Amino acid sequence: MKSKSPALPAEMPRSHELTRAQQNATRKQDDGLASLLTPKNGIMRAVEKALLRGDGRHASPPVAEQIAARLAGLIALDILKPGQRLFENDISEVLGVSRSPVREAIRILERDHLVELNARRGATVRAPEADELQDIFEVRTTLFGILLEQVMHDRPAELQATLERFLPQQEQAANETAESYAVQSFLCNLAIADLCSNRLVVDQLKMISLRTLRYVRLGLGSSDKAVTEALKGWRAFYNAVVKRNVPLVIAAATRRIALVRDFSITEIGKVKAVVD
């Protein structure tokens, strides 16, 4: 039996239980790293589900993957900002771990295009341009179309059941906050992807979803109509699935992705203006 990897702290311990490393972490509030020790919210749990390729109930993933998932969650929440540098020493201090798993975690985030490595500056949070985000969404649309063709051929009833499970949750979340809706939409996309047997397509889609989650979340919160229109897109997609009409399914999915893309690209312009 494989031994479980040690788990990172689930939340900030009480003040009298703080280690020296964790006491040092409280001085790092300005760079957002102290949030690594706060309880995980919906976005962070969703990111963890995507990045760790599972729910973690049966075995603890390697420490490096746990660290990568925490950092990815902070990027999605906009706590770690575009262009912000990530220092191995600071992260290892905050979490009370050695630099080795932190270094590996940063490599994982580079693989998923959430950070970039530079010989002089080290690791920084990526800040994609609007044109790059446009390209990413085009790839996402193409891959999702490939996925849907296979799922509609092999498992249409399961796709319908998945949507029937998530739509009520999305509708409830839409009445709460844009962030709650973004979490449910993200989780629904992951569940749909898991119906596909082409693991290369699935892994690429999950990686792209992680890359765009931050801007999708900001885009959905950009106006009152953003979530309403996005939810309409899911309903149209569901209706097409019920009809078992593959071209209609793909067309509905394409329109839904394009809608979210437009909101997201608008937001990236605002973020870039702030960064500049």
Image: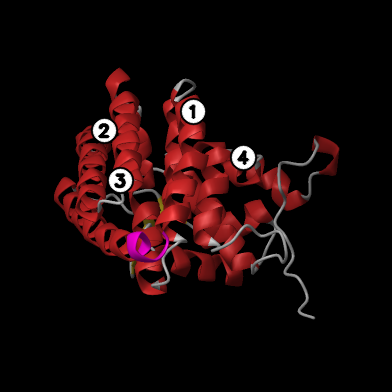
Instruction: Say whether disc 1 or disc 2 marks the residue closer to the N-terminus.
Output: 1
C-alpha separation, residue under disc 3 versus residue under disc 2:
45 Å
Above or below — where is 82 with respect to 196? above
Label 3, label 1: how far apart the Cα atoms are: 26 Å
Residue 162 in the figure: left or right of residue 25: left
Please state if 75 lies on the left or on the right of 256 as rendered.
right
Q: Which mark is residue 243?
A: 3
Q: CA distance from mark 1 to mark 2?
A: 29 Å
User: What separation in Å lies between label 3 and label 4 (alpha carbons)?
Assistant: 57 Å
| Residue 236 figure quarter | top left
From this view, report whether residue 86 is shown above or below residue 175. Answer: below
Q: Nearer the viewer, residue 249 or 15?
A: 249
Q: Is residue 122 visible?
A: no
Q: Secondary structure at mark 4?
A: helix
What residue sits right under mark 4 in the picture? 27
Residue 262, position as x, y percentages in the image: 19, 37
User: Tag 3: residue type?
Assistant: Lys
Say if the magenta span includes residue 24: no
Dot 3 or dot 4: first in sequence order is 4
- As helix, strand or loop, the secondary structure at mark 3 comes to loop
Q: CA distance from mark 1 to mark 4?
A: 35 Å
